[in-house]
Image (spheres, rainbow, N blue to C red):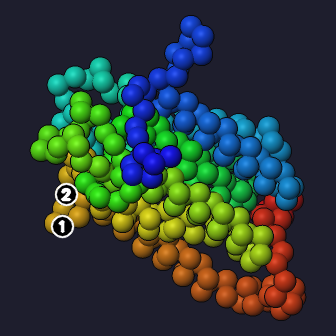
Amino acid sequence: MLSLVQSLPSPSIGKLSIGPVQLSAYGLMIALGVIAATMLASRRLERIGAGTSDEMQSVAMWSVFGGLIGARLYHVVTAWELFEDDLWRIPMVWKGGLGIPGGLLGGVAAGGFVVRRLNLSLPAVLTAVAPAIPLAQAIGRWGNWWNQELFGRPTTLPWGLEISADKTPSGFSDAVLFHPTFLYESLWSLGLCAALLAVDRYRPLRPGRLFAVYLAGYFAGRFWIEGLRIDPSHTIGALRLNQWVALAVVVTALGYLAVDAHRHRDDDSDRDESTGGAACSPLAEASPSSQ
């Protein structure tokens, strides 16, 4: 227990053995995150009658596929120097290297296509999945711990992360502890999931807005966490590329919320008056029967 208080150890290997079968711990964490997120989103969509569990699973399957492609392409494009001399590394996603901005873009695009094919309400589905995505991220980020990657700058904090000598960046002593940025992002995402569930329960928003709140909340946290990281990254001015992307997403999400609130201010006022300020699920407004 004393060693755990003094530092956070890293695993010696990035694989889990189940009998003769060896599994990539990185891939397993992502898979567990996807399963948990799909279960939560399916339950939420069924609860308000906007779709079935089977339909949500279809949306999730294609969203994961599109998200995986988008996340990998984002990483490859933004870190091309790592792949230009070895193109065979591009499909090796189990070794790490997925960019969340690209994953969200690809996942939403693929999922949105399936939503239209199934004749579901896109705002309802986006609201259902809003808390589920950070749940997946909270679990999936532990894959970085298993791979000993994407950690932050050196720290003397008691929860500093130990890194193996062969994983320690050049210029840093192997005795130095590093900020466990994977842990920071995991905890931030888990807290965001709980906050979104609370908002949706006690003060529901117009369909689609909860997803914008997720985007603003996640990328606000990603901005400061990204500032702690020391892995190679392109910079523009004083900020890393992903910090600029995070700022752009936060501004866009907040702008959407402001514009949407202005456009529907009369409707929002009428709904508050009709319910006496009590919470009611807005997802029902976006169910197929009310399209």
User: At numbered mark 2, what does the secondary structure look like: helix, strand or loop?
Assistant: strand
- Residue at the disc numbered 1: 238
The residue depicted at 21 percent of the width and 40 percent of the height is 174
Under mark 1, the amino acid is: Ala
Image quarter of residue 238:
bottom left
**What x and y, as percent, mark residue 153?**
26, 54
Residue neighbourhood size for the residue with mark 1, other residues' Cα within 10 Å, grouped as few (<14), some (14–19), many (≥20):
few
Pinpoint residue 54: horizontal percent, then vertical percent: 79, 37
Residue 92: give x, y in percent of width and height: 38, 25
Secondary structure beneath dot 1 equals loop
Give the quadrant of the C terminus: bottom right
What residue type is disc 2 on? Thr
Query: Which residue is painted at 60% across and 16% down in the image?
Result: 18
Asked if labels 2 and 1 touch by Cβ distance under 8 angstroms, the answer is yes
Residue 285 higher or lower than 139, as above or below: below
Q: List the residue tagged with mark 2.
A: 235
Location of residue 236 in the rendering, given as x and y in whole percent from the top left corner: 18, 62
